[in-house]
Amino acid sequence: NERHENDQRLAYLSRFDDLTGEMNRWRLTEILGAALDDAIKGRSSCAFLLIAVDNLARINEAYGFGIADEVISAVARRLRSKLRASDALGRFSGNKFGI
């Protein structure tokens, strides 16, 4: 029913970015915390990479928000295609991705 679909949609959005389908900031931060805990317990290492799309504001101004959203989605797809299955990718903020 409609209420169940709404609940499912909200549950999805609580963990994933609607535009890219990748993890949202909250879920990415949760995964990062778990990775840090594992690294400390195992006396090993881990890494976090923050990637920003430069000049996104110029794209918004020149071509509109729809095109800027397409750029963000394309960047997410390209990043995902270059990562290992075990790597975590999420949208950290408007123009930033965390790996």
Image (cartoon, grey):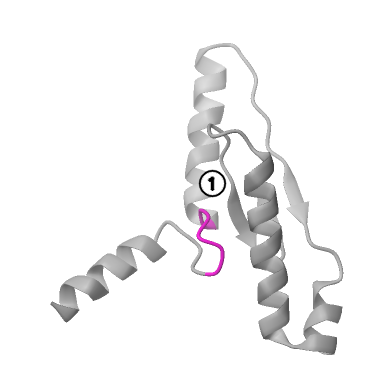
In the drawing, does residue 62 fall left or right of residue 33?
Answer: right
State the quadrant of the C terminus: top right
Task: Tell me where residue 6 sits by quadrant.
Answer: bottom left
29 and 7: which one is in front?
7
> Is the residue 50 above or below the residue 47 in the image?
below
Residue 6 is a magenta residue: no
Question: Which amino acid does the dot numbered 1 rest on?
Answer: Thr
In the image, 64 versus 32, the foreground residue is 64
Q: Quadrant of residue 54?
A: bottom right
- Image point 86% across, 71% down: which residue? 55
Q: Is residue 45 above or below residue 25?
A: above
Q: Residue at x 78, y 57 (%)?
A: 52
* Dominant secondary structure (helix, strand or loop) of the stretch shown in magenta: loop
Visible residue check, residue 17: yes
**Magenta-drawn stretch contains 23:** yes
From what the image shows, is residue 10 above or below residue 28? Answer: below
Residue position for label 1: 29
Residue visible at 40% across and 65% down?
A: 13
